[in-house]
Amino acid sequence: MEEEEKYRKYYEAVNRLLFWVRFLLFAIVILLFYLFIAYKGEGAPKWFQNEEVLITDSVKSPNDSIWQAPDTSAWQNEPNVNELRYGRNLIANTAHYYGPKGTIQHSSNGMNCQNCHLDAGTKAFGNNYGAVYSTYPKFRERSGKMESIPKRINDCFMRSLNGQAIDSNGKEMKAMVAYMKWLGKDVKKGERPKGAGLKELNFLNRAASPENGKTLFAIKCVSCHQANGAGKKNSDSASFQYPPLWGINSYNRGAGLHRIIRFTSFIKYNMPQGATFKNPQLSDEEAWDIAAFVNSQERPNMDLSHDWPNLKTKPIDYPYGPYADKFTEQAHKYGPFEKLKKK
Ligand code: HEC
Ligand code: HEC
């Protein structure tokens, strides 16, 4: 009897203990769950963070949200609405005005500014104009001079459109500048909002591979840009449905996109057509290798002898010497870039 009583007490004690153990485990699980939901901030491991937190821009941003262009339906009230409309048109349909069959003059390669400055320069990380009005005029190392917006626009005419500069005081230039001013009207002078321009990606720890890129290009890009990289003309044959990536109608070797870091930044978050920074369709490796392949193809020439007068400021991915460092053109063209990074 006494024996039995002892066992019963023993049994109850074990039961109580088990109850508390279970309770504690349960509490821990609840706590972990709560932490999982609540803690996705800056300090958390990368795989654990919200996408928004992962978007890091090297430049200071006035607030946390991604830049958005003002709504064009609101420009009805602007006194210069017609000028704004004209400016936007010139950017979206540049070939119509300046292409091989242009109505103003035949001085560009048939591409539109919008082919590279997507949605008329309004798409987040789509090479938009969000920071143009707030940061120009500025000193640029490529020319070694102070540059105004018209000078910068003419740079793209001469390099990206492989053409001639347009009249800096003409009505077309004024309209494009007015449009860029309107786009940047809510950005404080000197500031570069998050989402402006392009978004760079991490370097690979190897050189980018044109051979891999060739295979990937055939799978992911050929359907639109064609196997010879020449793109596809519209039926009016005056502009492109799919713009060229190399060859005589493409941007020339002095253009910004010819630098591999720019090119990867552009395609990673914008290509194939439909990709966005929130929904990229290429892995980092794919972007680098495809860029290496496209950058290995022929494109129009340009006199680059006056660029980068101060060699020390030449970008690490500039594919043409001379350089201030000991690395070869090959290394500057394909990387690996970590060791080329300026100290
Ligand atoms: C082949 C692609 C391409 C085309 C076409 C092109 N651009 Fe550009 N543009 C670029 C690249 C790349 C940059 C450099 C972006 C950077 O530095 O982050 C740039 C930079 C600019 C900038 C400076 C942006 C900034 O934030 O500093 C302006 C302004 C500009 N382009 C205007 C134009 C205009 C206007 C046209 C048409 C006449 C045009 N671009 C056509 C690729 C292009
Ligand atoms: C579904 C069709 C399509 C596919 C696939 C596609 N692109 Fe494009 N790409 C376009 C269009 C259209 C534009 C011009 C965008 C505009 O004008 O709004 C463009 C523009 C570009 C530009 C800037 C303009 C130029 O011609 O230099 C580059 C660079 C580019 N694409 C690279 C690529 C690469 C690399 C791939 C493969 C990873 C790719 N694209 C896949 C349709 C496509």
Image (cartoon, rainbow, N blue to C red):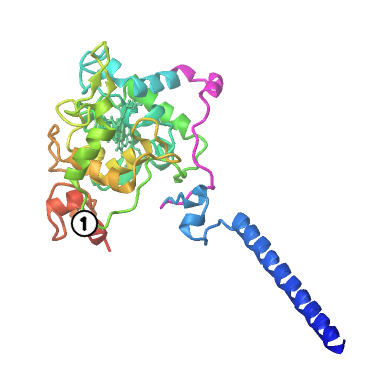
Neighbor class of circle 1 (other Cα within 10 Å; few <14, some 14-19, many 20+) is few
Report the label total: 1
Q: Which residue is mark 1?
A: 312
Looking at this rendering, what residue extends furthest in the bottom direction?
2
Residue placed most toward the observer, 250 or 214: 214
Residue 180: x and y in percent read 42, 31
Horizontally, residue 39 falls left or right of residue 2, namely left
Q: Is residue 308 above or below residue 220?
A: below
Quadrant of the image occupied by residue 30 = bottom right
Depth order, front residue of 238/105: 238
Q: Is residue 151 visible?
A: no
x and y percentages locating residue 267 in the rendered image: 32, 38
Residue 317 higher or lower than 99, as above or below? below
Q: Quadrant of the C terminus?
A: bottom left
* 19 is higher (above) or lower (below) than 291: below
Residues rendered magenta in the picture: 58-82
Q: Is residue 71 magenta?
A: yes
Going by the numbered disc 1, the residue's amino acid type is Lys
